[in-house]
Amino acid sequence: MIRALGIGMAGLMALGLSTGTGAAHPHVFADTTIGFERNAEGDVTALTVRWHYDAFTSLTLWEILDLDPDRDGVLDAVDFAMIAAGETDWPPGYTGDLHIGEGPGFAAPRHASAGEEDQRIWVAFTLPFEAPRPADGLRVEIYDPGYYYAYTTEAVAPEGCAVDVIQPDLDDGAMDLRAQLAALSQEEMPEDPNVGEAFAETVLLTCN
């Protein structure tokens, strides 16, 4: 819960204002698309990421960022620039809920943009690696450790590669955990600070 959206929604809940997502964790839902940029040697130099937020979260952004100051009900380029900046201005160590194994980590996001589709806000950006990583076998896990955000993931394979999105193994224990999280009040946080890993979706890239 690092991004402007998460911080803003937490503030609304602290004031006792409903976010419309009920008491349950998670509070924010995003359809996520992951792509890959490669160099001449075939290594992956960056991910491309697109978050498409749920309808209520999209409306909440209007309140958090005080969008549409002329109150005509239409977002303009200035509004979208504020959204893009607020959702990609991250503190050191935060990686947008994208997790990779050993090797070069992520640098700061760049080329951020935002827009609206189907009355839902989207945010897109490029997330470069600190140094290129081999493409074959690259794994990226998508999850919020605190399970404040929930992601549904699609991935686009670069030329010469295949990509799979591996769903979490939701056994009886995971389903019980999900029910426990759903019962938390707005003020309560999960005891396990990394509880969201149980619901991670994994993108696996396979290349020739």
Image (cartoon, rainbow, N blue to C red):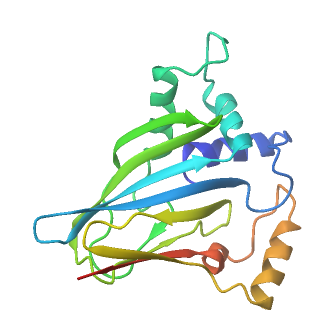
Q: Is residue 107 left or right of residue 43?
A: right
Q: Quadrant of residue 174?
A: bottom right
Q: Nearer the viewer, residue 51 or 82?
A: 51
Residue 65 rendering spot, x and y as whole percentages: 60, 30
Question: Would you place residue 43 above or below residue 36 in this image?
Answer: below
**Residue 21 image point, x, y percent:** 81, 50
**Which is nearer the eye, 173 or 204?**
204
Residue furthest to the left in view is: 40
Q: How many labels were placed on the picture?
A: 0
**Picture quarter containing residue 60?**
top right
| Position of residue 32 measured from the top left corner of the image (x, y, whole percent) | 53, 57
Q: Residue, x 39% and y 47% (percent of image)?
A: 125
**Left or right of residue 129, residue 124 in this image:** right
Q: Quadrant of the N terminus?
A: bottom right
Q: Provide residue 126's location: percent of width, then percent of height.
A: 34, 51
Left or right? Give the position of 56 relative to 17.
left
- Nearest the viewer among 144 and 29 is 29
80 sits left or right of 158 in the view: right
The front one of 11 and 206 is: 206
Residue 54 vertical placement versus 144 (above, below) = above
Residue shown at the point (66%, 11%) measured from the top left: 72
Where the C terminus falls, by quadrant? bottom left
Name which residue lies at 79% across and 45% down: 14
The residue located at (80%, 90%) in the rendering is 172
Q: Which residue is most to the front?
A: 160
